[in-house]
Amino acid sequence: MLKRMKLAIVGVGKLGLALLEGVIRQEVLAPQEIGIMGRTQSKVQAIAERTGTQALPPGDLQGAERVLICLKPQMFQDAAAWLAQPDTGYISTMAGVKLSTLSRHLHTERVVRAMPNLAATLGLSQTAIASPQQAESGGDVSMARQLFAAVGQTYDLPESLFDVFTGMSASGPGYAAIIAESLADGAVRMGMPRALAQELAARVLLSSGQLLLQREHPGLLKDEVSSPGGTTIAGLEVLETSGIRGIMMSTVVAATQRSQELGRLQE
């Protein structure tokens, strides 16, 4: 390796690639300061040529100041042996993998835990960040904030809230997709063409999110669109009768518990 890299990204799937493109687009780092690594070398080489970054050989992280780990949590223990490098800071997006687990396997306290979501591909992610004091003083947390601010909003959270953040925010686009699909199916059931129904459902969720951010509580928006004896209140009655609140709460609980389970498997 000819020069010391500011950042090596291990894993260039959807998330890793979104982060790479966001960091370059926002000029957090110059392309030549970034190295990338993945399972398929031909894919890595193609991305490197397109972005102007360095394509790293599998398992070769020598010279990286910091490493951004975008692997599935089940892959971590097998990869830890070559991920661990002297004088290196680490930022992990692996669901459920605790700071203590990262430190133990990577032999350093310079570890940061981050949890974004797929909206990073649009620059609209919500990312939780947590770290021990050693990472804060070494500049690794500051770098993590800059990296993830390039693809959305960042939130400094205690690690105790990471699993529930994962279960609600990181997994949230999947829940929203089910809601959008269900809305579209209802419209199709009543005669609307599928393509139009799907577009409208997506735009309803998009605009509703913006409206919710302008209000102190979701119930305020619900009340605003619920006219006495109107269509919205009729639809809301069905949702309440079906137990939608309990279903959504249980969904977040189940995803949170799965994140906790993934963490225990890596300890």
Image: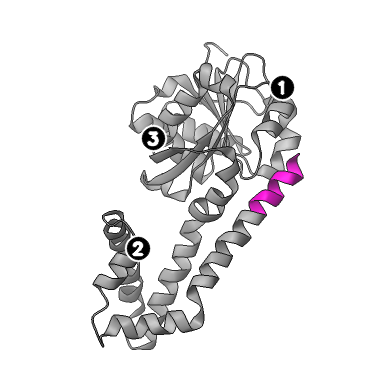
Q: Secondary structure at mark 1?
A: loop
Instruction: Give the image quarter of residue 120.
Output: top left
The quadrant of the rendering that contains the C terminus is top right
Earlier-in-chain disc, 2 versus 3? 3
Inspect the magenta stretch and tell me whether residue 50 lies in it. Answer: no
Inspect the magenta stretch and tell me whether residue 266 lies in it. Answer: yes
Number of the label disc, if any, that sits on residue 247: none
Earlier-in-chain disc, 1 versus 2? 1
Q: Do the numbered discs 1 and 3 sit on residues whose CB atoms are within 8 Å?
A: no
Residue 166 vs 204, above or below: the answer is above
Q: How many marks?
A: 3
Amino acid type of the residue tagged 1 in the rendering:
His
Amino acid type of the residue tagged 2 in the rendering:
Pro
Q: Residue at x 39, y 84 (%)?
A: 237
The spot of residue 189 in percent (x, y) is: 39, 87
| Mark 3 surroundings: few (<14), some (14-19) or many (≥20) residues within 10 A | many
Location of mark 2 (residue):
218
Q: Is residue 148 left or right of residue 232?
A: right
Location of mark 1 (residue):
107
Whole-angstrom CA distance, mark 1 to mark 3, is: 27 Å
The spot of residue 117 in percent (x, y) is: 48, 48
Q: Is residue 141 left or right of residue 1?
A: left
The spot of residue 266 in percent (x, y) is: 74, 41
| Mark 2 surroundings: few (<14), some (14-19) or many (≥20) residues within 10 A | some
Location of mark 3 (residue):
149
The spot of residue 179 in percent (x, y) is: 44, 70
Residues in magenta? 258-267
Q: Is residue 187 visible?
A: no
